Amino acid sequence: MADSNSTDFTNPSTFILQGIPGLETAHVWISIPFCTMYAIAILGNITILFIVKMDPSLHGPMYYFLCMLASNDLVLPTSIMIKTLSIFWFSSREINFSACLTQMYFINCISVMESGIFVAMAFDRYVAICDPLRHSTILTNSMVAKTGLVVLLRGIILILPYPLLARQWPYCRTNIISHSYCEHMAVVKLACANTQISSYYSLSVAFFVIGLDAFFISVSYVQILRAIFTLPRKGARLKTFGTCGSHLCVILSSYIPALFSFLTHRFGQKVALHFHILTANMYLLVPPMLHPIIYGARTKQIWDSLLQLFIHKVN
């Protein structure tokens, strides 16, 4: 195993993940909130999937998209937490080169897919509120499935260059990654080659995905708000807007941490490295934990189904 900062190798068999540099002595303590958030995310999203599956009244476009989001939120934290916890608990820092690129790919692919699901959910709310009579004919099961397929393919295709480019570069500086998982730019920085194409491409994908998706979501909600304010009664306006509240909270809980992490990484050169890494972990852990809580608390149908499930078990 090569563990020095000046090892000469072209294709490393393994990388060494440092975890959170500067906080190695606190790894066990840091693992407690990390593990707690991960457990809540897994339990919450499995519960969402189970409730939607068991309750026929929830078999509709809004809840199908919610199931896509819940599936996403099961894969995303799992892709980093198993290795991260093994570093924190067992000091198992080695990761195979191919496994590292696979982890990097899944993290970015799932993130792009999640943004696409938000757009699909916004479109569902737009049709449901602005054109309710055609909702069932526009968003058929077939259309929902096709939308999910487009979201999946977009993520797969846009992120595929990440590992393909990273695999062809020589790595002659070090095999030590100053991170708790194989974050894309942390891996790219280890290559002893001109990696500007990768940096420009990743930046373009980030702006393209977030910018385009945010634009479509904004257009949908502008139309939704216009439709809501044309309703004659205040109670009707509040009730209609309440159906979109969960979706807006979920979007904010995902985009704000991601944007904060992106800005600190790009422009926070004076920020401590351990803060960058903690932030990068939080934006992959916090949203999957919050999403089922937000939908469970704010969506009456899910809350009622959950209560009925518990009451039925008690009886």
Image (cartoon, helix red, strand yellow):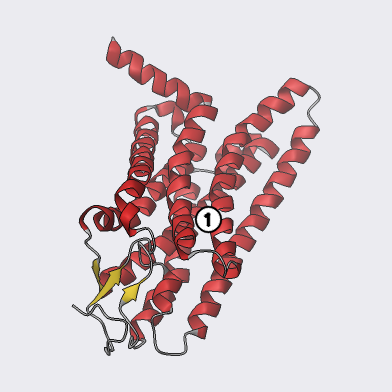
> In the image, what residue occupies the spot 33% across and 40% down?
39
Q: Residues within 10 Å of mark 1 (few under 14, many from 20)?
A: many
Front residue of this view, candidates 179 and 103: 179
Report x, y in % for residue 106: 37, 62
Q: Is residue 211 above or below residue 67?
A: below
The residue most toward the left is: 1
Number of numbered discs visible in the structure rendering: 1
Q: Is residue 169 left or right of residue 144?
A: left
Report x, y in % for residue 231: 78, 28
Looking at the rendering, in which quadrant would you find the C terminus? top left
The disc labelled 1 sits on which kind of residue? Answer: Gly
Residue labelled with disc 1? 116
Report x, y in % for residue 93: 25, 65
Quadrant hosting residue 166: bottom left
Q: Is residue 250 left or right of residue 24?
A: right
> In the image, what residue occupies the spot 39% across and 62% down?
22
Determine whether the residue tagged by mark 1 lies in a helix, strand or loop: helix
Looking at the rendering, in which quadrant would you find the N terminus? bottom left
Quadrant hosting residue 46: top left
Report x, y in % for residue 12: 25, 82
> In the image, what residue occupies the spot 34% across and 52% down?
26
Q: Is residue 161 left or right of residue 227?
A: left
Q: Is residue 77 above or below residue 54?
A: below
Front residue of this view, candidates 110 and 269: 269
Quadrant hosting residue 230: top right
> In the image, what residue occupies the spot 38% across and 64% down?
21
Residue 287 visible, this angle: yes
Residue 79 visible, this angle: no
